Amino acid sequence: MAFMHFDESIEIIKNIDINTYKKEKRYLTDTLGYVLAENIVADHNSPEFPTSAMDGYAVKHVDLALGRLKISSINPAGADLKEEVIGGCCIKTFTGSLMPAGADTLIPIENVTVEANEIVINEEVPFGFSVRAIGENYEKDQTLITGGTKIDFAQIGVMASLNVVTPLVYEKPRVAILSTGSELLELGDTQTSDAQIRSSNNYILEALVNKYDGQALQLGCILDDKETILKSVKSALVQSDIVVTTGGVSVGDFDFVKDVIVELGCEVLFKGVRVKPGQHIMVAKKEDKFIVALPGFAYSSTVTALLYLVPLIAKLQKSKCSLRIVEATLRGKFNKRQKKAEFTACNYSLENGNYFVDFKGKKNGSSAILTNMLGSTALLITSDEDASKVTGDKVQILLID
């Protein structure tokens, strides 16, 4: 069996065409973490009129030289004041209040002393001081947030100020999760045989999907039986945008997932990649739905889910994958084991703006050692062509937290 170069498999994921993106209107306060499917354009200036930025007194700047001004009125925030500022007078004005007509400057309360119904100017301010100009925040017809932006608190605040009640967003993809294996036990199940093992893959994947902006549909564990797998995957495709399976993609007698995918009429985008862990990864497509078939070992399935499933979840929302690759310095040697792209669990730290990695406490062994993902863990990336590394070498790491 010929295995694909890792970079080629990633390019295939990047170049997938989505014919129809699912969109929905959501109430603004329920859009945190969603991706905008429209541009947000200002329908007014903010502020619409010159506005006070502090508590103080609205004045004509030329009158500050008089040294003393009469207080002619008070202008609370929200008031529709009709009185104008005339020469020799001022109007007490509060933060957020519209500037009274005739005034061009606000002198803060800290700069004056009040004597009866007058203010004494203790310290002058420049022309236009503490007056918010029309459109200071944003101008009418200005695009404030572009489609494709992931919504955070700032975007929610801006949309609230524009009275955007139900913005249009991309639906978070529904990801159905199936773990295959007759030996697997669900949470809470009683072990009746030494051959049985506790399933963790489906729970890891559920957490990953929810963490990286999908909607997980937990379908649990199923037996290594072809008819059961066929029925389960077919049903999962109806209910979801992505079906992710673990196990059943290698070359064993009971590895039926790869066969079922073909029988369901899916287009196999790739099967088998020169990557460690997870070389038997398989990704298939049926219209705008996908099947991501991961290996059965816990560490393998976790790493390959990060490499292939997480970017696909982002792609279905016209978004960018949130995982980052950064440069780091090795604090120990690294032995390159095989001529494959390798993703090796390592400890990382950020010191004075620079990343450092080591392997203290990380175990060598099979692709089943899930505990290697505990702690401040990243994945050290080495390509097919890389050789072993020594202390002080610069390397690339994939940040996963």
Image (cartoon, rainbow, N blue to C red):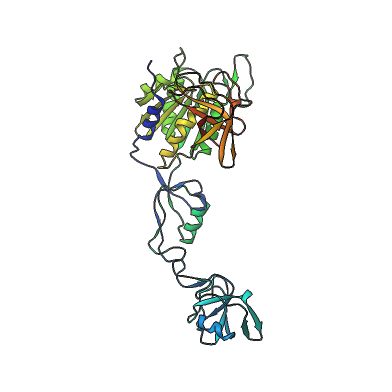
Q: x and y percent of residue 159 in the render?
A: 47, 57
Residue 113 appears left or right of 29 = right
Residue at the top extreme of this rendering: 253
Q: At 46% across and 37% down in the image, what residue appears?
A: 174
Give the image location of residue 287, x and y in percent: 34, 33
Camera-nearest residue between 261 and 213: 213
- Name the residue at 35% across, 34% down: 15
Image-quadrant location for residue 265: top left
Quarter the N terminus occupies: top left
Say whether residue 32 is visible: yes
- Residue 330, quarter of picture: top right
Along the line of sight, the residue nearer the viewer: 19 or 103: 103
In this orientation, does residue 60 appear? no
Residue name at image x 51 percent, y 57 percent:
157
Q: Is residue 123 left or right of residue 266?
A: right
The location of residue 253, given as percent across then percent down, is 46, 12
Q: Position of residue 49 (x, y in %)?
A: 46, 72
The mark total stands at 0
Q: Is residue 315 above or below residue 72?
A: above
Give the quarter of the figure containing the C terminus. top right
